């Protein structure tokens, strides 16, 4: 049962980001990593956001994944109030192809890092969280290695089909 | 006396930004606008930052000027906790020429605007604050018009020297 | 009646920008701020544009909102002839995703600031104008605080739906 | 005598641009094209700028060269009030390497073109003005062809030195 | 009859650019400026391209308009073999939004200018050619002034409709 | 003794990167996290690089920090052969301000994430590694919280000095 | 028969790139250059990728063409383990228009070059491979010259159609 | 003797590029590949440039290396008149960090590829030429493999020094 207490928190500024951020959740599910998902807007509910970050570690979370777009402040602000690693997902908006989101998340000042993944790469954020956990969990690490072996097999199969 | 209670707050993430942000202060001084200057780091003192923004209006401030560089979250975060207009100054860092700072400040989501000025344009931030105040203060507006007339005279004098 | 004299001017280079700039107008309407909307093209009617800016303050406007795209000169040119705060909205054109519009508006020289909002952020331009007015109008400020509280409630409701 | 009445106008926002824009003047002098140089700031003396553009053709100018940096509005605004060809020189500022200047000048809307040259290319602006004039002046065209032949000879001499 | 000998040459790398470059031709037609249009590819028919540029002036052309995309070499190469002013139109390709085309055209080295217009601005290229011709043709200049007055009237009418 | 077996590997393409990447090492030292540093060039010693990544986990490493510039392949290639989290530091080269390094590191395909920090942010890479470890080590987490409290105190002290 | 042993290897990270990379194959077929195509993912099958590059020359290949997108490491990694020339094709992904792919491929460090072609230019990669082979094969060079003559004829025919 | 007839041509727009392009020559010398160096400006001596490219193959060259900056047309124009592989070196100018040079060289249209190397990477251009030659010259290929082995040894030695 305690197993199912979430150890990864997935947060985003609006539920409209969910179809997008869901990819992070799916990756965690593939590895049976319990997570929670929530709307925690840096700009619309700053006090709750600060509170979420401040309490994340004591609530048992090991990693926080935060998706945001444009002047994307959520990942960095959470990183400033939690000692946990925060993974930032640059969500692309209608204009500028996510370049604004990327720079707003990755260019953090000395002292407060955010682990940034590619523009729109919610799935990779989930997989990065798994890696962080797996470094301290041999069984999970074995599953990650299996996952990587699977990626290889799929790529090899694609090669075989192409060569035929 | 009440005249000297600050009505503009100038904040920045570190005192190392002061030589830079001082230009905003100088512009306010030219117009005898009382201001305060403070270090309020979004990433190093988030609770104080939230508090500063939350109390800005009740403390009598009419405008907040915030300078920040890189993943520049200070202006946007302050804007999320104050109803006052927040002016953001993109401070250029060692790399990327302030493009990261600019996008992190200007690309705010719907609902929470930041009035952004040019990369490194602390002086213009001060002048923009004066304009905001002058719109409701005829004497100050007259001084701004005078200031603009002076800019013109200086430009004209330059033209005369060049034509000679 | 005097209440309905416009205190915010919304201007744009062509009526084809209206569907876009209308978002600024809607934001002002939500706060019952009287405004006017006009086509004032910097490049097609420069004399009228100069005239509009020059007379804006004496006509009772407190803020000017100007939307423009590409080599977007309207906000900056208006700022050069009025002592009022000018809010610039970078309108994205077919190519370059509004980056040209943004830089043409925000990178103003020392002495003549433009309060720039995000690419395409007409609604935020309206809200920024409300903030500027609200700094000198306690009732309006209270409404802005209410508006911000509403944003929070909506975001919280979204979080609840997501957590379910 | 009438020969010496200027037929090219070189304008810039400040006399601090003169060392830079002087390269345009030098190019014109090499071709004995009479010119005038003036400070005409779009943002600091907008009425004079409009007036300069409006009267340029009747005063006998055939081409206007305008240098400007950042949110560079001078070339485009002049083009809006004169039927003459306007050549824009993007002056690079301290940050962004002139990309803001370039986009602010070249991305003009349909109806009002500016003939834009490279970032910092004041000399080429002068040579472009000569070409425009030379298209209607056989003697000047012959000199431009000579100039081009000289460029070739110099390049060939460089090649010889290198091959030795 | 001599009237109809073309004085503007519109060239492009492929006839697939014609629907696009046709806007330049239309602008010239509005001003009854005789022109020719041709496919002159810098990369696929370099000798013909060099020949076209070399003979342009003696054939009676006064201006050359060249549209090109990507590594766009046509305008600059033509400028290197003709003393005439060359107007470059950056044609946007499938990727990069014409930024490659723009830089490839505008960033010419000292000695060989290209008069560059906005990304995709074929119509403005035509209008710029008209301005170059009009500087030496009073009747044409009067038509350009009329054209500009028309632009103003249309903009004013749009303003009226909006204000209603 | 086992305490001193390295649990973080810091790798770079050349020892000339060491003065730069040393900041990551210093951050780890502040938290008494044992690390190793090595030159593992993706492009000059690809087999050793693959070998380093493949054996990283079994050798007891929990996190790998990799710095690289330009077409920066080291972080991503290591991530492809280890199940451990890999932190990528974009090293800025002489041109392009590290934008090439950043994109080469952060834009990883689905399946193989790299935790990217800011351009040149070697110190933050070290701190991010500490956070990853601290999520599973209460004592280390307490030290990170202390570190964050210190950052705050320093920022507050700066504010006091500025306010004086 | 030996004639049909492949001398160009076309590789890509996934068979989903085949419709795209097929253009390289088609160009080779037009010149009767025998080639092979395979899926060799740098990130999903790094050992096989290293192996592919290491054995490419001994297997008789003369050129390797590698297509990749985003943090595109395949071309550069292959170049690090083969002495053969490697041609890199930047494949554009959903965001950033291939700029990340281009920089990840072209910005290789001293010692390990990749011959990079335009974003999405798989066909040109094939033609570049033909040129490399043709430099040592007079018959193939004659065919390339014929191909170039054909390009010219097609362009000329387009010109004729346009002039009509 | 015939051995010393140049088989690689290194060309550039001005002898001022020689200190820069010399790195390509040095790389060729390390492999005893005979080369020639010349100034062949696309914009200042277009006819000679066309001639150089047209005759390159018949004169015995196997590869052409062309360096150019800004609106860099030399590599692409040479590629249009020779069937040989052309290697383009984007030379960075004072502004824009070579991004203009890179795009002007790499973004060639279908049919006329240029093998582009990194901004400022003249040495890599030389090494790429060696690879192209080595694919058809077993002795040279062995030397390239040796060179690569040396790169590895140097990198390993650096690692040893760092680990000590």
Image (cartoon, coloured by chain):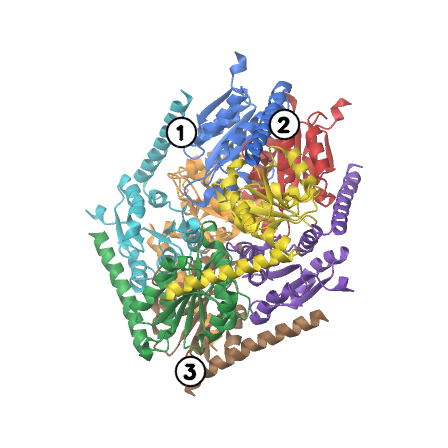
Chain colours: A cyan, B brown, C green, D purple, E yellow, F orange, G blue, H red
Discs 1 and 3 share one subunit: no
Look at mark 3 in the image and give the residue it sits on. Answer: B5
Tell me the number on the disc at residue B147. Answer: none
* Cβ atoms under marks 3 and 2 closer than 8 Å: no
Q: Position of residue G29 (x, y in %)?
A: 51, 21
Against B96, residue C4 (above or below) is below
- Residue E10 seen in this snapshot: no
Marks 3/2: CA distance?
A: 77 Å
**Mark 2 highlights which residue?**
H83
User: Which of label 1 and label 2 is nearer to you?
Assistant: 2
Identify the residue at image location x=56%, y=42%. Answer: E68
Residue annotated with mark 1:
G15
- Alpha carbons under labels 1 and 3: distance apart: 68 Å
Figure disc tally = 3
Tell me the element at label 1: helix
Label 1, label 2: how many angstroms apart (C-alpha)?
A: 31 Å
**Residue F80 on image: x %, y %:** 42, 37
Q: Nearer the viewer, mark 1 or mark 3?
A: 1
């Amino acid at each position: 049962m305690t197993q199912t207490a979430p150890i990864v928190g997935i947060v985003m500024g609006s539920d409209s980001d969910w179809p997008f951020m869901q990819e992070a959740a799916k990756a965690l599910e593939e590895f049976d990593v319990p997570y929670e998902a929530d709307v925690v807007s840096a700009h619309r509910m700053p006090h709750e956001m600060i509170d979420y970050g401040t309490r994340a570690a004591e609530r048992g979370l090991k990693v926080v994944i935060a998706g945001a777009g444009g002047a994307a402040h959520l990942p960095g602000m959470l990183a400033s109030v939690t000692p946990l690693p925060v993974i930032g997902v640059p969500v692309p908006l209608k204009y500028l192809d996510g370049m604004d989101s990327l720079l707003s998340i990755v260019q953090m000042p000395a002292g407060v890092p955010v682990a940034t993944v590619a523009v729109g790469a919610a799935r990779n954020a989930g997989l990065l969280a798994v890696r962080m956990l797996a470094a301290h969990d041999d069984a999970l690490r074995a599953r990650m290695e299996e996952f990587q072996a699977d990626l290889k097999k799929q790529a090899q199969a694609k090669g075989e089909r192409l060569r035929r």
